[in-house]
Amino acid sequence: MKKRSFSTTFLFRELSKGPENPWDTALSGRTINSEKCNGITTLELCAGAGGQAIGLEQAGLEHAGLLEIDKHACATLRLNRPGWNVIEQDLNTFDGTHFKGVDIISGGLPCPPFSVAGKQLGKKDERNLFPAMIRLVDQIRPRAVMIENVRGIMGAVFEDYRGYVKKELVKLGYEPGWKLMNASDFGVPQLRPRVVFIAVQKNLTEHFSWPQPSDIPPKTVGETLLDLMAANGWKGAQTWAKQANEIAPTIVGGSHKHGGPDLGPTRSRKAWAVLGVDGLGIANEAPSADFAGIPRLTVRMVARLQGFQDTWQFAGTKTQMYRQVGNAFPPPFARAVAEQLRACLSRPRLIRVAG
């Protein structure tokens, strides 16, 4: 078992069932067939570069539409999936009338309103899009909702706001729940705590359970990136990989107001330095054969640490690409949750016959 220098015991202690988490984690050993399930569709909000969209696709869900306001992220989605219905529009002005009948509303709503790295303005932050999400749920009435956000939203300061979101969804006929999980529990080589909000129609409540963490530990940064670091023949690649013998700290993408092409604030950069990575910037390419010093990661390397497949391309400048990658919901993590949701929605519907 590979060791982890970043303790997850405190962050990810199993939450007991209660008002904010009405479901158990899936039973150990339970397996779900990932073959495509016809007819289960999703409208994704704030789709970004497609991290969650890939995970949902891998779980067998079909995309009815992907809404995103950032033109560079929209270009990324269209570049990789020309057949997807990518809608470049502000969520606050989006009319979901034409999407009535969609099974799931999914998405990763903006994190800055709730991030501990920001001012935590919550509902007072102009970037808070939970009200817009609730409006669309009311308008479309999907069978389920799946929203990702930062762990900060589970803080005591936002208890009343979580209660507000729950109350609004309950009024619409849903059973909501929140759970803090880590991407590393689903094979992603990164300490990336994220909160997932699930709401299902009340007649489906007993059929949903949270995903079970994998028994297989994620690869280390060195194991994950060795071939990319050695791509230009760097002689020190093997030695570097041995030093980078832990999973990565949380990759920080920043916001449109703040954040550039680097690996985060001082605390994050110190954690990267322990792994032999210079976090002050993002490199254009892998180290040369005779490179001496501490290497920087490329956008492709960061994307792999986020769980993106190497064939997924990103549009825009280096800063724009890195921001897309850094803000993504890792595909393997999204897939694990989506498979549980798909299993819930795939339950046979019982028809009562008169007489």
Image (cartoon, rainbow, N blue to C red):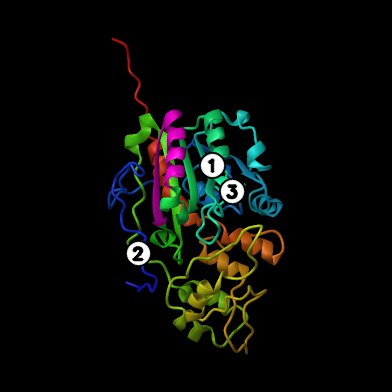
- Which percent across, then down, holds residue 208? 35, 40
Q: In this image, 11 relative to 74: left or right?
A: left
Q: Secondary structure at mark 1?
A: helix
* Disc 3 crowd, CA 10 A, few/some/many (<14, 14-19, 20+): few
Residues at marks 1 and 2 touching, judged by CB atoms closer than 8 Å:
no
Q: Amino acid at mark 2?
A: Ile
- Please tell me whether residue 172 belongs to the stretch shown in magenta: yes
Magenta stretch bounds: 159-181
Q: Nearer the viewer, residue 126 or 225?
A: 126
For label 1, count other residues whose C-alpha is less than 10 Å away and answer few (under 14), some (14-19) or many (20+): some
Give the structural element (helix, strand or loop) at label 3: loop
Q: Which mark is residue 130?
A: 1
Q: Which mark is residue 200?
A: none
All told, the count of numbered labels is 3
Q: How far separated are the C-alphas under marks 3 and 2? A: 39 Å
- What residue did someone put label 2 on? 216
The amino acid type of the residue labelled 3 equals: Asp
Q: State whether residue 101 appears in this view.
A: no
Question: Outermost residue, top direction?
Answer: 355
Q: Quadrant of the C terminus?
A: top left
Image quarter of residue 140:
top right
Identity of the residue drawn at 50% across and 47% down? 56
Q: Nearer the viewer, residue 94 or 40?
A: 94
Q: Amino acid at mark 1?
A: Phe
- Looking at the image, residue 218 lies above or below residue 64: below
Residue at the spot of label 3: 125
